[in-house]
Structures are given as C-alpha cells and as structure tokens.
Image (cartoon, rainbow, N blue to C red):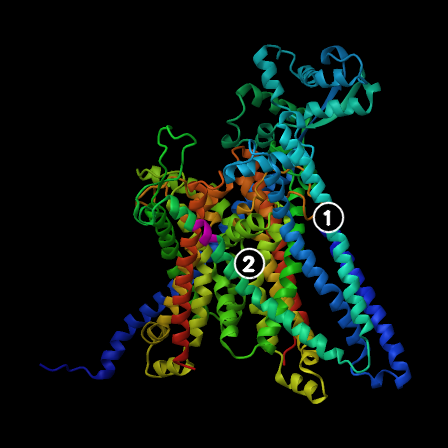
C-alpha cells in the first residue's frame, strides 16, 4: 500500500484504539464506583492508547519510507553482473534510471542489455515486497501497540502522567527540529565541499580570479580545464549588494526617521503598512521587474548619455534589490530609534534644539550601533538574495567594478550549476555546494555580528 | 575686540538658518517615503500594464470545410489515415476564402502562421470523435498564433508588431475589421497547465502545484512550530541546550532561502532518494524554511497570555500540561494563526529553493497528488519570464497578478484574524 494511504490508515487505527480504551476505562471503573476512582480521567487512558498505537507505527513508517528507496537501489545495482556493473557514481545513476524506466514501462526492454531487464524485474519485485511488508508491519505494530495500551487500562495506572510526559517529549523533539535543520544544512554542504576540494585545491578556489566551471567531457577537448576562482563571483555579489545598500540605507533610514519623529499618528498608520507591502512582494516579482523593465530602461538611458551598458547590468539588479530591502532597513531602524529613551529626546528639545538637531546630534549617535546592526542584517539579506540576480544579472563572471557591466553572483552560479543538466560528482556540480557553504558562512557571520551589536546596544538602556 | 551682540541676538539670527535646516531635513524624510511609495506604484502599474492582456485571448472563427481530398483523408475511422492526414489544409483554405490572392508558397506559409499550431489538432480531434463530419463544413473557433494575438491586443504599438510581416499585419487588420478575429476573456489561462505556445498555456497547473505544496508545508510547519514554541516558552529548562536551540532558530530565520534548497537537494533527494520536482519535497523544504517565522510569532503570542490565567488554572489544580493545552494555547491561537498565515504567504512566494529541487521542469499535466511532478506559481512566473516569446511576458505578469492576489488575500486574512480574535488583556 502506498505511504499516502497508509498514513490515514494508521490514524484510523489510532482513533479506534482511542474509542476502545475510552469504553474500557469506564467498564473497568464500574466495580470501583465510577471513573472518580480511576487514577486518571478516561480521556487520558484513551489518549494513551492512541499514542501507543500511532507513535511506533509512524516512526517505523517514516524510517522505512525514507530508506527503502536507497536500499532497494543498492540491492538492484549490486545484483548486476560484472560487465554491466557501474564503475562510477555517474554511471550508477545512469543505469539506475534505465532500470527504473524499464520497470515503469517507459523504455522498451529490447533497447537495453539483458541484465538490465533482469534488474528491472528484480526492482519491481523488491518494490512490491517492500511495500507489502511495510503495510503489514505497520498495521501489526499499530494494532499491537494499541492492544497493549488497551490491556493496561487499569485503575492503578496514572495515564495522565504518561500522556503528559510523552507530549513533553514530542514538544521537545519539535523544538529540536531547529537544531536538526542546522545540522542538516551544515552536513549537506560540508561533504560535497570536502569532495570538491579534493578535486580543486582550496587556494585556487579562494584566490583564483577566473570562474568558468565548464569541465570537458573528453580530456582532449579545448578548454578542458575548468577554472574555479571565486573572486569574480565575490566581487560581483559585493557590487550588487553595495548598490542595493546605497539605495536602501538612506531611503530606509530617512523613512524611519520621518515615520517615528514627524508623521502624525494617522499618517503612520497608513504609510507603514504601505511601506511594508514592499517587503511582502515575492522576489520573483522583483526579478521580473528588474529584468524586463529596469534593465532595458537603464541600457536605453546609458545609450542616450553615450555610455555603454550591458543588457543585464549590475545596476538594474542592485537598484531593484535596494527597493526590496528598504522596508527591512526602515523597520529595523524604526525599532532602534524608538528604543532610544524619550528622556534623551525631551532633554535635547528642552535645551532649544530643533527636531532635526535632536535627531542628528542626540538620537543618531545613541542609535548608531543598532542602525549598524540593521545595515549588516540588510547586507546579509542582499548577499543571499537569489531570484532578482538570477533573472536580472548575467552569467558572465566579469571581474569589474563598473555598475553598467554584467556581473554574476554566488547565488546565480549555485542556481545555474544545479538546475541545468548535472553530471553527478563532477567538479562543476560539487562547486555549487562549495559556493553554498561559503554563502552560509558569510551570512551566518554577518548575522551573528549584527545580532551581537544590536543586543549589546539594547542593554545600555534597559 | 568684543562681540557687541548679546547671546539672545546670536541665537535669533541663527534661527533662520536652523529652521531652514529643519525644513530640509523634514523634506528628506518625506522624499524617502515618496521614493519608496513611488517604487511600489511603478512596480504595480508596470505589472498590471504588462499583464492585463494576459487575461485576454484572441480567437479566430472560420468556416472550415472538412474536405477529405484536401486532407488526404478518405475514411476518418481509419487510425492510420488519421495519423497521416494534413489537418492544416482546411484551415488554410478557409483563410484563403478571405484572401484569395494568397496562393504562393510564401503566402501560404504566412497564412499558416496566423493560426495557433494546435488548430490542426482541434480538427483531428473533432474528426476522431465524430467521423461522420468528414465532408461537411463546420464553424470552428481557434486560438490565433501568439504573435498575432500580441499584435491584436497591442494594436498600434510598434514594439509588438515586429514579428509579423507587413502582409500579415494587413491581413490581421482586415480580419479584425470583419469580426473574424476577436478577443475574449482568457479562460484557457485558468484551465490548463503550461504549454510551449503562449496562447495555449495556462496557470491552473501551477496553482494546483502550489496548493499541494502549501498543504504539505502547513501540515508540517504549523504543528511543529506551535509545539516548539510551547516547549520553549512553557517547559524548557534554563540550560545550555535551550540556549542552543534558540540561537539556532534565530540563525535559521536569517539563512538565505537558497541554502534550504541545497539542504533539500542533499538530504531529501540525495540521502532519502525522494523523487525530484514533487510537491512533497517542495513542501518539506518550505516547511523547514518557514518554521523559524512560525516559532517566533507563536512564542510572542504565548508570551502575551497573562500569567494570571496560568495561575488561576494552576490554583484549580490543573497540571502544567493541562494549563498549557486547555488555557494558554487556545488563548494564543489567534496570534499563532496570524503568524502562520504570514509565514505561509512568504512560502507561497518563494522560488529559489524550489529551483534546486527540480520544480522547474516543464510540466503540461495538472498535478493530481502529492507525489506527481509539479511546478508552483512563482516558479512558473520565473519560467515564463525567461522565455523569449512576447506572449509569455504577459502571461508572467498575469501570473504575478494572481500570485499577488493570493498573497494580499492571505495577509488581509491575517490582519482580519488579529483584529477579530485577538484579545487585549
């Protein structure tokens, strides 16, 4: 049976267990003078039975589903005779897709070697058996668990404590998902990165100045050496992020100042949500806008004033990204400005300073660390932004600081390397993970520093 | 040398300059807001201006004479003949009724390019279903070719007519005048999946894909996020592990979304061998991505439940878990739901991680389950925006309008929910 059907089935069994245990708890309580004399309310006996029924079954189901594909694949591949057995991982994935296509009936068995047809039969067979076993085992465990809990519906057992302890554990595991995700991220990039550095020396990656990840299919092909120097990607990312910050920091900061110090209550209530709409627009929309409206506009404009602009200029991507980050900068600065104690403001105004003087000479200096933290967060946002640059920045890894030329970024390269036809295990594919690792480390460092600054500053006034 | 003026005079004289500075500063603030709002306005007008034509389809209505001889088709019940027959021929001759002069090889080719390439399939399908119609004349309505459609919708604009020859433009103008070529509400767009031809492409497949993906996301992210928030607020002991969990949640909230795509690719697809481009994997990745948002907002909601409620419940003899499940969580639910809806709106607009797990495939069929290949709305927009045909650009903007409508509805719902259900203590 398919997992999608097995899941509701387990839940149905759990509900049945719940009802049976509920009824039994009443029957059991009868001779003692009603449910008053049970250790826990019938609900808890019933919930306990449902948990006993569902949890082990669901764990088994999840684990089986997660690993059955891999295990079956390995068995099938190792069943192939030596002459067709794959020698590399790339070949393995090719053979596997052949086998599964034959098994699914998409590929005519006459076009592939005999052993592959045999393997396809084996695959079908194993899948069937695995599926049957899974169904039987899951149902068996669910019924056994429920039955056990049902038999333990006894007055002296404190079902409430059992249920509450289990729930606490479930809550704890849910909170632990955050750790698991981080660990997952770190491991998913680290393994491939290490393998990448086995093929390309780390110094070449970090200090090389050319990026052209085209590895050749044949050794004698022209330009067979791929170049994996990350410097042009890094400068490209920095250039676009810099342009974005040049747009968003002044605009965002000044809007925050206006909203918090000058705007009337009503004006603020209207303007703030409007400003925040900019943050709610999906990045793909900004990318569309940058690529189809802003970029042609900039290149036309540059033509008129006699400059040469690429059709995919860094300026277009940077400008639009800047617009995207405005509400981010503005709401962070707003928080920081509002956190400056009113006494400082009142003191300055009482001395006769105008509002702008108070702002520039008193509040800004007091809020500066927080604002810096906000800008760092915005920078990390800009560096990790993907869709705008994928759609509006180019693919050519130029080492330039000219905002009118086309540059590429780390995120663009990750997407390009992993969405095209991938050769498994090639330096080209692996390099995407190395770039991802770099991106993760840089944004993480920026965030940690920014949060430290913000927190440290906040403590001054609390 | 002494300054004769008193302190008060100096101040009074400087006032003018200082007030001017004050006004300028204020103006900068207004200008900043104006820049931001203007960008928003330009963005929206640009998208609406580019995309409203996406909701319009252009059709051509022709009297097609289903002449067996012209199609090389003697018997419409014969499968072999059906697969060999030329179904374009009757359409061409129907067009030639209007333009008898177009008989040359080049003219015929240009005539052919007026009608969408699926027009022939329509004729074939008709004949397959009702073979007895062979030899009759039927009034049929076809979609026009993408270039013609764009030309008709943007009549008079040079930028949209370059793909048509002058002769074709003249023909189309004449057909529009005669009412043969008409525009109508684009129902195709709302009822189909993707296509290679813009006039035949629809957004329904992507919407359904998004729906499946969002169901997976919310089914995972909401319960896990609420449970994690409850644990951290109500049960977690003050220790290193709790601190570590909190640090992790805060950092995950700021990790670029594309990194989650790498995680999905390496763990769900690589390690667990899940299939590519299915809503389940997309939903899992987006769930992990929105989890921090949901946890953070749920914690805020739990924090805002006053301690007196907890104390009262405890005073009545409730256990800690009963206090939480019977009182705190129900009272915090509106806040949690608001945060989750906003998180879902973010996830709905997310594109980058889904590119990496293969949801960029070209998929014509409308997905029918959590394990069938699918694409989602923002990815569909990306795919259309990167296509060369002009017709896809308007579809992309029309898709954006639909996406934004969904997101605005979700956000409005969140605000409404907050206003309606949230209690002030």
Q: Is residue A443 left or right of residue A75?
A: left
The disc placed on residue A35 is none
Q: Disc 2 on helix, strand or loop?
A: helix
Which segment is the magenta one? A189-193
Where does residue B242 sit, x and y in percent of width and height? 52, 74
Where does residue B292 sit, x and y in percent of width and height? 55, 64
Q: Is residue A377 left or right of residue A80?
A: left
Asked if residue A406 shows in the view, the reply is: yes
If the image is split into quadrants, where does the N terminus of chain B sit? bottom left
Residue extending farthest front: A82
Asked if residue A293 shows in the view, the reply is: no
- Camera-side residue of A53 and A236: A53
Where does residue A142 sit, x and y in percent of width and height? 77, 62
Q: Alpha-carbon neighbours of circle 2 within 10 Å: few (<14), some, or many (≥20)?
A: many
- Camera-side residue of B362 and B9: B362
Q: Nearer the viewer, mark 2 or mark 1?
A: 1
> What residue appears at the point 34 percent right and 65 percent down from the top-left corner?
B24
If the image is split into quadrants, where does the C terminus of chain B sit? bottom right
Q: Main secondary structure of the magenta part?
A: helix
Q: Alpha-carbon neighbours of circle 1 within 10 Å: few (<14), some, or many (≥20)?
A: some
* Chain label for disc 1: A
Where does residue B415 sit, x and y in percent of width and height? 62, 65
Is A192 part of what is drawn in magenta?
A: yes
Residue position for label 2: B289
Residue extending farthest bottom: B315
Is A262 part of what is drawn in magenta?
A: no
Residue position for label 1: A131
- Camera-side residue of B212 and B322: B322
Q: Disc 1 on helix, strand or loop?
A: helix
CB atoms at circles 2 and 1 under 8 Å apart?
Answer: no
């Amino acid at each position: 049976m398919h997992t999608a059907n097995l899941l509701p089935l387990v839940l149905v069994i759990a509900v049945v267990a719940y009802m049976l245990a509920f009824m039994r708890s009443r029957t059991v309580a009868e001779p003692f003078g009603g449910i008053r004399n049970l250790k826990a309310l019938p609900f808890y006996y019933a919930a306990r039975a449902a948990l006993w029924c569902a949890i082990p079954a669901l764990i088994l189901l999840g684990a089986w589903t997660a690993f059955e594909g891999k295990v079956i694949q390995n068995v099938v591949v190792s069943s192939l005779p030596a002459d067709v057995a794959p020698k590399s991982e790339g070949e393995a994935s090719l053979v596997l897709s052949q086998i599964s296509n034959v098994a699914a009936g998409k590929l005519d068995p006459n076009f592939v070697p005999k052993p592959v047809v045999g393997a396809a039969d084996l695959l079908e067979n194993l899948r069937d058996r695995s599926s049957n076993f899974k169904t039987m085992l899951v149902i068996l465990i669910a019924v056994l668990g429920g039955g056990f809990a049902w038999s333990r519906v006894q007055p002296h057992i404190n079902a409430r404590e059992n249920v509450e302890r289990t729930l606490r554990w479930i809550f704890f595991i849910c909170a632990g998902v955050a750790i698991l995700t981080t660990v997952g991220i770190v491991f998913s990039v680290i393994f491939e990165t290490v393998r990448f550095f086995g093929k390309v020396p780390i110094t070449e990656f970090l200090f090389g100045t050319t990026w052209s990840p085209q590895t050749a299919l044949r050794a004698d092909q022209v330009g067979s050496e791929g170049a994996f120097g990350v410097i042009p990607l890094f400068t490209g990312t920095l250039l676009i992020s810099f342009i974005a910050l040049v747009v968003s920091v002044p605009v965002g900061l000044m809007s925050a100042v206006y909203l918090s110090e000058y705007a009337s209550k009503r004006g603020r209530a209207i303007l703030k949500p409007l400003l925040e709409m900019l943050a709610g627009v999906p990045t793909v929309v900004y990318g569309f806008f940058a690529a189809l409206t802003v970029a042609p506009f900039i290149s036309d404009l540059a033509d008129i004033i006699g400059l040469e602009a690429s059709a995919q200029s860094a300026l277009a991507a940077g400008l639009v990204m800047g617009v995207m980050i405005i509400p981010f900068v503005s709401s962070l600065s707003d928080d920081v400005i509002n956190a400056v104690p009113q006494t400082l403001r009142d003191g300055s105004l009482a001395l006769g300073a105008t509002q702008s003087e108070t702002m520039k000479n008193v509040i800004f200096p007091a809020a500066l660390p927080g604002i810096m933290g906000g800008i760092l967060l915005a920078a990390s946002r800009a560096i990790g932004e993907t869709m705008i640059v994928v759609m509006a920045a180019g693919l050519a890894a130029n080492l330039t600081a000219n905002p009118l030329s086309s540059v590429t970024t780390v995120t663009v390269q990750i997407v390009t390397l992993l969405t095209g036809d991938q050769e498994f295990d090639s330096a080209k594919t692996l390099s995407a993970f190395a770039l991802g690792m770099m991106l993760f480390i840089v944004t993480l460092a920026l965030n940690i520093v920014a949060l430290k600054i913000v927190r440290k500053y906040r403590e001054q006034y609390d | 040398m002494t300054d004769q003026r008193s302190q008060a005079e100096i101040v009074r004289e400087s006032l003018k300059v200082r007030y001017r500075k004050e006004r300028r500063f204020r103006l900068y603030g207004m200008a900043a807001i104006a820049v931001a709002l203007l960008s928003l306005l330009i963005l929206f007008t640009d998208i609406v201006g580019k995309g409203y034509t996406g909701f319009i389809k252009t059709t051509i209505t022709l009297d097609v004479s289903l002449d067996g001889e012209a199609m090389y088709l003697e018997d419409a019940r014969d499968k072999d003949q059906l697969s060999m027959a030329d179904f374009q021929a009757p359409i061409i001759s129907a067009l030639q009724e209007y333009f008898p002069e177009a008989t040359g090889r080049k003219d015929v080719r240009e005539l052919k390019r007026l009608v969408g390439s699926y027009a022939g399939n329509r004729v074939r399908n008709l004949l397959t279903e009702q073979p007895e119609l062979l030899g009759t004349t039927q009034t049929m309505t076809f979609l026009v070719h993408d270039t013609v459609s764009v030309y008709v919708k943007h009549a008079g604009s040079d930028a949209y007519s370059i793909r048509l020859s002058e002769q074709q433009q003249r023909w189309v103008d004449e057909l529009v005048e005669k009412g043969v070529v008409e525009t109508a509400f684009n129902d195709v767009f709302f009822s189909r999946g993707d296509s290679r031809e813009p006039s035949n492409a629809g957004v329904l497949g992507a919407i359904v894909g998004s729906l499946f993906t969002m169901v997976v996301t919310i089914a995972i992210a909401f319960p896990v996020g609420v449970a994690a928030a409850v644990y951290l607020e109500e049960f977690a002991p003050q220790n290193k592990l709790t601190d570590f969990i909190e640090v992790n949640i805060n950092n995950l909230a700021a990790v670029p979304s594309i990194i989650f795509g790498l995680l999905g690719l390496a763990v769900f697809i690589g390690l667990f061998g899940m299939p590519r481009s299915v809503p389940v994997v997309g939903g899992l990745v987006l769930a992990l991505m929105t989890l921090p948002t949901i946890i953070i907002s749920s914690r805020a909601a739990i924090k805002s439940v006053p301690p007196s409620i907890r104390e009262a419940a405890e005073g009545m003899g409730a256990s800690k878990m009963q206090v939480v499940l019977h009182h705190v969580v129900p009272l915090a639910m509106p806040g949690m739901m608001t945060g989750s809806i906003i998180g879902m709106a973010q996830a709905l607009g997310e594109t980058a991680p889904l590119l990496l797990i293969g949801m960029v495939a070209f998929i014509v069929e409308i997905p029918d389950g959590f394990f069938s290949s699918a694409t989602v709305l923002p990815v569909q927009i990306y795919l259309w925006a990167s296509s060369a045909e002009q017709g896809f650009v308007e579809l992309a903007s029309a898709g954006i309008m639909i996406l934004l409508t969904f997101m605005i509805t979700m956000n409005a719902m969140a605000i409404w929910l907050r206003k309606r259900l949230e209690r002030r203590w």
